[in-house]
Image (tube, rainbow, N blue to C red):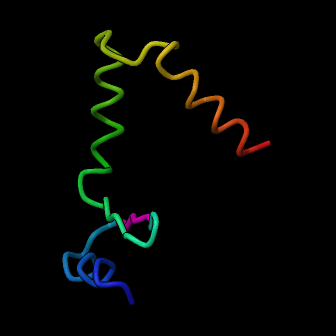
Amino acid sequence: MKTTFLKALNFRAKTFRSITVEGEELEFSEGFTDLHTITYQDILIGKGFKISETKKAIEIVHSIRV
């Protein structure tokens, strides 16, 4: 098993998230749950992303899913 996965088990993490890019594992389990809450709070107070800032990301996801 990957070392970071074992660390997550030791911390009793609710979720484990990692991605391997060019042979290097990046683990980002901590803080991920609150990210959505913080993002939604920012949107509600007018500090969300603009459509022009998100257009490229939406196009990329769309091309992957089609």
Identify which residue, 3 or 36, lies in the foreground: 3
Identify which residue, 2 or 29, lies in the foreground: 2
Name the quadrant containing residue 62.
Answer: top right
Name the quadrant containing residue 43.
Answer: top left
Q: Residue at x 21, y 82 (%)?
A: 10
Name the quadrant containing residue 2.
Answer: bottom left
Q: Quadrant of the C terminus?
A: top right
Q: Residue furthest left?
A: 11
Question: Residue 52 lies in magenta, yes or no?
Answer: no
Q: Quadrant of the N terminus?
A: bottom left
Q: Residue furthest right?
A: 66
Q: Residue at x 24, y 58 (%)?
A: 30
- Give the left or right position of residue 28, taking residue 64 as reference: left
Q: Could you tell me residue 64's position as x and y percent?
A: 71, 45
Number of marks in picture? 0
The stretch of residues the image draws in magenta is 15-19
Q: Could you tell me residue 38's position as x and y percent?
A: 27, 32
Answer above or below: position of 53 versus 21: above
- Give the left or right position of residue 22, taking residue 26 as reference: right
Q: Could you tell me residue 46's position as x and y percent?
A: 32, 9
Q: Residue furthest front?
A: 22
* Majority secondary structure in the magenta region: loop
Q: Residue at x 29, y 21 (%)?
A: 42
Q: Residue at x 45, y 13 (%)?
A: 50
